[in-house]
Amino acid sequence: GQNIDQPTEMTATEGAIVQINCTYQTSGFNGLFWYQQHAGEAPTFLSYNVLDGLEEKGRFSSFLSRSKGYSYLLLKELQMKDSASYLCAEKIKAAGNKLTFGGGTRVLVKP
Amino acid sequence: GAGVSQSPRYKVAKRGQDVALRCDPISGHVSLFWYQQALGQGPEFLTYFQNEAQLDKSGLPSDRFFAERPEGSVSTLKIQRTQQEDSAVYLCASSLAGDHGYTFGSGTRLTVV
């Protein structure tokens, strides 16, 4: 998706931590979402940030800095089942309710 | 229903054939979205409905693509005269308020041969 950048692929070891960065368009920003998508399956909602700071949900945390147009998704205590694509998506005020997605970051967890 | 249901799960079409993809959203969800996802890419927006009104169709790639939601529930995405570049997964998503993301269906994988 245009204006949203995230790394294409990351590899990490089981039990470790991985941080997936995302930069987005700041003009008209109205919310930042992270989704997880296993191969051949539907994207599933992970987190939503609209204010600056860190939101923690179990092993997953998401951070937002609106002034920098930057977010990250932190995955702790990695498990093999965390191998998936992680999609960063932005909602823009002028665009109504639609989400604009980045290309996704494919995370491979190795034993 | 409990989730967003899409059918068929897989569709193989010969080039030039018309196809119709169905989405059954979560009951009561006002907003419905269609996305196209190419292999290894993120979903790309196609069109958006609020109830039966199609409020945004800016993502439809050509006039061969048409979507409808006549009674504000089930939606159909129709692609006429399919071409090879139409091969992708077509995802449908629905939302109640739109503030906390959508619920996606499992998608229809369209292969045009």
Image (spheres, grey):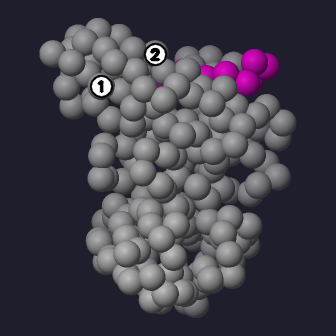
Residue B34 visible in the current orientation: yes
Q: Residue at x 32, y 77 (%)?
A: B12
Residue at the disc numbered 1? A108
Pinpoint residue A99: horizontal percent, then vertical percent: 63, 50
**x and y, in percent, of residue B107 in the image:** 38, 64
Viewer-proximal residue among B41 and B100: B41
Rendered location of residue B5, percent (x, y): 34, 71
What residue type is disc 1 on?
Answer: Leu
Q: Residue at x 84, y 36 (%)?
A: A27
The answer to which image quadrant residue A72 occupies is top right
Q: Real-space Cα distance between discs 2 and 1?
A: 13 Å
Q: How many marks?
A: 2
The disc labelled 2 sits on which kind of residue? Gln
Using the image, tell me which numbered label, if any, was put on residue A19: 2
Q: Nearer the viewer, residue A29 or B86?
A: B86
Foreground label between 2 and 1: 1
Q: Locate the N terminus of chain B and report the quarter of the image it occupies.
A: bottom left
Residue located at (56% from left, 28% from top): A6
Q: How many neighbours does mark 1 have within 10 angstroms: few (below 14), some (14-19), or many (20 or more)?
A: some
Point out the image quarter for the C terminus of chain B: bottom left
On the same chain: label 2 and label 1?
A: yes
Is B3 on the left-hand or right-hand side of B63? left
Label 2 secondary element: strand
Rate crowding at label 2 as few (under 14), some (14 to 19) or many (20 or more) other CA atoms within 10 Å: some
Q: Which of the chains bears the disc numbered 1?
A: A
The answer to whether residue B108 is left or right of residue A111 is: right
- Residue A77 seen in the figure: no
Answer above or below: position of B41 versus B23. above
Q: Residue A54: give its label.
A: none
Q: Is residue A28 magenta?
A: no
Which residues, given as a range, are shown in magenta?
A: A66-73
Which circle's residue, 2 or 1, is located before the other in the chain? 2
